[in-house]
Image (cartoon, rainbow, N blue to C red):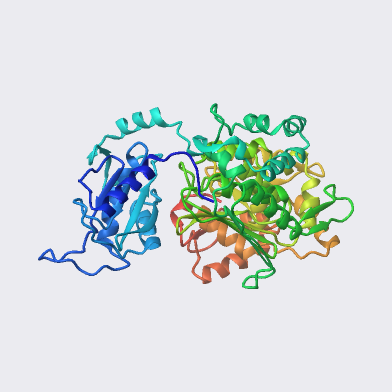
């Protein structure tokens, strides 16, 4: 089935350029959308043509500069590499994936290109499409965009003013050439099923509407009766599969199940993938007294958010499917295209949601398969932490692709029960509290500096989150407590209160669970490295031990070269140790 998405001016211009090149009638008619480039570095001093190679650094720099100019131009643009500007076909042997990733590196990870080989009159060329940039892309310190058939420098203020005019462009919201009547009945039935399974009265009403009205209310039909591009993806399909689900029992094992079928709506693919994931996501029954009762190895909400995010925010201009690898209790979702709109791995929990495909994202939310924009990632994090799993890993990898990994370790019933005993009960639903508690249990302590990158918040917001946690209780005693022995002029730190720790350890004994608590040496090492100093009073408070019983731990770290004494005689009130890796932090402090 051919793809019949809405018209793309760039694709139309590229098709016309290739037609003219093939017929030998190219007349240097370059436009703001398409430019022809002979591969740089292919000629010697006599201008003779040299053999092509899969990698060519000069050519990568050439493409990076020209593509940055195209991306900065409203609407983006394309290069046809391997053809001279007079239409002479030179060819290119550059490797597609190498070139795409090298340009990504050269542009400081800001430009993701679509690169595809084409053959014209027996000559291999590359069509390189640069999507419109969200922020100006600098090449060698300058911002350039295309005016007519030339790249010219533009000041950032003018660039942003032009972008504000065009900022509402969304490919997935554009009209296609597909009539709404061609929506597949099976895909519409899946949408109804998602709505009915949501236990939402408004969704029930929507699900009962006739198909034309349902599609209209889902905002996937234009006034002329054609589907939007989001509607084509969801209810008709793009031809090739949008999803590739692979199930393995162990890493490196044979594939036991696979879902990789195209020529159908994306919603049909999504429903089948969800069905397979559920069948391979075992239900675990929890001990009596834990209100949750039973859970799956991987929380369903986290799974849904990971999969749907891999569809909603991906680059649909790339042909690869979103890949879902379900290996044992781990789910790994890899989607084409890098992070978008200023989102990075370091801010993805708290950054305002940005989507390449707003209309598609809103469609997923409307049929209740995902959260509204802005809460999906923290919901994923929260659901994993509540079961005692690790925080999901969300990273950008070479390609670029975005990869989300949900690792379902053995269900931690002690942790689940312990969280349910905290007051107020809302703490167990608060993603910031869960992140802080997980860190305090795993590392032994927390302060604002250490918490900021964990919560992905600024200092004021982080202090506020810690303050809310300090107000929580367990058995009418604070969950966390201030670390004693910190000088008055230093910022505070907190560790788990003895009551909270005893409660979790008691639950571990009842469940016959062995928890890996941090050792005294590990706590002392991380505390000193982070804060620059540590005293026996501080280490005693951190570990629940008498200060007189932890001196040997600090002496051992001194012998290992990780600490040094604050004074040579090691005596008297206020004696402490300085970190040898970060000594300036602790200078001048009083113990």
Relative image position of residue 563 (x, y in whole percent): 51, 64
Q: Considering only vertical position in the picture, is 192 above or below 419?
A: above
User: Could you say which quadrant of the image residue 279 lies in?
Assistant: bottom right
Relative image position of residue 580 (x, y in whole percent): 46, 62
Q: Is residue 374 left or right of residue 315?
A: right
Q: Is residue 210 left or right of residue 33?
A: right
The residue lying furthest to the bottom in this view is 253
Q: Nearer the viewer, residue 54 or 579?
A: 54
User: Could you say which quadrant of the image residue 135 lies in?
Assistant: top left
Relative image position of residue 517 (x, y in whole percent): 69, 62
The residue lying furthest to the front in this view is 23
Residue displayed at 86% across by 60% down: 510
Relative image position of residue 486 (x, y in whole percent): 58, 48
Residue displayed at 39% across by 27% down: 165
Q: Considering only vertical position in the picture, is 566 above or below 353?
A: below
User: Could you say which quadrant of the image residue 325 lies in?
Assistant: bottom right
Q: Nearer the viewer, residue 263 or 559?
A: 263
The residue lying furthest to the left in this view is 46
Q: Is residue 502 left or right of residue 402?
A: right
Q: Is residue 123 left or right of residue 454?
A: left
Q: Is residue 118 visible?
A: yes
All told, the count of numbered labels is 0
Residue displayed at 30% across by 63% down: 122
Q: Is residue 451 visible?
A: no
């Amino acid at each position: 089935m051919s793809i019949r998405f809405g018209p793309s001016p760039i694709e139309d211009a590229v098709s016309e350029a290739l037609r003219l090149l093939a017929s030998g009638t190219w007349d240097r008619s370059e436009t703001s959308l398409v430019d022809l480039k002979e591969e740089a570095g292919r000629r010697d001093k006599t201008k003779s043509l040299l053999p092509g190679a899969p990698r060519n650094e000069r050519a990568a720099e050439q493409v990076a500069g020209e593509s940055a100019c195209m991306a900065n131009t409203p609407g983006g643009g394309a290069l046809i590499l391997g053809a001279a500007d007079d239409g002479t076909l030179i060819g290119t042997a550059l490797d597609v994936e190498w070139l795409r990733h090298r340009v990504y590196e050269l542009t400081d990870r800001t430009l993701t290109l679509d690169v595809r080989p084409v053959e014209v009159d027996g000559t291999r060329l590359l069509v390189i499409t640069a999507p419109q940039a969200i922020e100006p892309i600098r090449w060698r310190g300058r911002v350039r965009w295309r005016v007519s058939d030339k790249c010219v420098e533009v000041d950032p203020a003018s660039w942003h003013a032009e972008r504000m005019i065009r900022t509402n462009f969304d490919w997935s919201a554009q009209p296609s050439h597909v009539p709404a009547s061609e929506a597949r009945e099976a895909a519409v039935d899946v949408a109804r099923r998602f709505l009915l399974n949501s236990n939402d009265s408004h969704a029930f009403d929507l699900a009962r509407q006739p198909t034309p009205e349902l599609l209209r209310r889902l905002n996937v039909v234009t006034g002329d009766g054609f589907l939007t591009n989001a509607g084509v993806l969801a209810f008709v399909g793009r031809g090739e599969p949008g999803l590739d689900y692979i199930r393995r029992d162990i890493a490196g094992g044979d594939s036991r199940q696979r879902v990789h079928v195209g020529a159908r709506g994306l919603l049909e693919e999504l429903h089948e993938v969800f069905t397979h994931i559920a069948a391979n996501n075992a239900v675990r029954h929890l001990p009596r007294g834990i209100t949750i009762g039973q859970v799956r190895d991987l929380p369903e909400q986290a799974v849904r958010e990971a999969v749907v995010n891999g569809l909603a925010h991906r680059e649909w201009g790339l042909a690869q499917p979103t890949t879902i690898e379900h290996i044992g209790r781990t789910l790994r979702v890899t989607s084409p295209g890098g992070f978008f709109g200023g989102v990075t791995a370091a801010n993805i929990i708290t950054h305002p949601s940005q989507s390449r495909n707003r209309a598609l994202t809103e469609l997923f939310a409307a049929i209740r398969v995902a959260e509204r924009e802005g809460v999906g990632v923290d919901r994923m994090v929260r659901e994993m932490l509540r079961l005692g799993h690790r925080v999901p890993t969300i990273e950008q990898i070479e390609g670029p692709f975005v990869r989300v990994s949900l690792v379902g370790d053995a269900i931690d019933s002690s942790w689940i029960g312990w969280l349910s005993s905290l007051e107020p009960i809302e703490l167990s639903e608060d993603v910031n509290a869960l992140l802080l508690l997980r860190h305090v249990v795993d590392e032994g302590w927390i302060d604002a500096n250490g918490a900021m990158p964990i919560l992905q918040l600024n200092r004021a917001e982080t202090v506020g989150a810690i303050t809310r946690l300090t107000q929580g209780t367990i058995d009418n005693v604070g969950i966390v407590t201030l670390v004693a022995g910190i000088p008055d002029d230093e910022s505070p730190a907190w560790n788990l209160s003895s009551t909270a720790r005893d409660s979790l350890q008691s639950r571990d004994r009842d469940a016959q669970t062995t928890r890996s608590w941090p050792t005294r040496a590990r706590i002392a090492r991380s505390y000193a490295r982070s804060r620059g100093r540590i005293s026996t009073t501080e280490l005693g408070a951190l570990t629940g031990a008498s200060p007189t019983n932890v001196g040997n731990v600090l002496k051992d770290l001194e012998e290992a070269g990780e600490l040094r004494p604050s004074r040579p005689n090691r005596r008297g009130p206020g004696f402490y140790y300085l970190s040898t890796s970060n000594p300036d932090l602790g200078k001048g402090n009083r113990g």
